[in-house]
Image (cartoon, grey):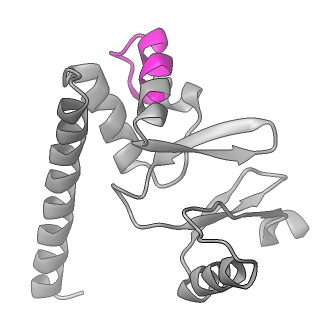
Amino acid sequence: MNINQLYKYCKFVAIKCYTAIMSIEKVLENHKLRVTRPRQEIFETLRCASRPLSEVEIATATPTVDPVTVYRTIELFMKLEVVIGVAHGWKQRYELASMFRPHHHHILCNECGRVEEIQSEKLEQFIRQLGINRGFQVSGHTFEITGLCENCLR
């Protein structure tokens, strides 16, 4: 990557980060809720995460926020559709909803817990067509694949 490409990428990331931070403030203000430091820290932790996080991982990543506040904030963010839950077995993990990042799905390893994002327009088209074929107007969906990753198969 040359310097111009790197500059453009960094500028893009900075704009995306600024937009996301402004958006969480707007969501909270639209619901007549205060923008607090703990809410911003929890949002920022989820924004920077490369995979869905458990409540314990979020609490560990935000040591200045009381664990009870973390749990209550996640519950609030779920109600406001700021975050979505990603089920992996009996464990629930959380990530930002599609208003803050592109829509995607996951493939999860049952052995080591590895999580990868899947973005596929073909899959989205298939889901829309499946709804049409069944007489449904699709308003949302979840799609997760579970199994064993290549490392755990060895």
The C terminus: image quadrant: bottom right
Nearer the observer, 29 or 115: 29
At 73% from the left and 59% from the top, the residue drawn is 108
Q: Position of residue 141 (x, y in %)?
A: 62, 62
Q: Which residues are magenta?
A: 61-74
Q: Position of residue 50 (x, y in %)?
A: 47, 55
Q: Residue furthest right?
A: 154
Picture quadrant where residue 90 is located: top right
The N terminus: image quadrant: bottom left
- Please check the rendered image and state whether residue 70 is part of the magenta-colored stretch, yes or no: yes
Q: Position of residue 82 (x, y in %)?
A: 39, 42
Q: Position of residue 78 (x, y in %)?
A: 48, 35
- Please check the rendered image and state whether residue 131 is part of the magenta-colored stretch, yes or no: no
Q: Is residue 64 left or right of residue 114?
A: left
Q: Is residue 124 left or right of residue 101?
A: right
At 14% from the left and 52% from the top, the residue drawn is 18
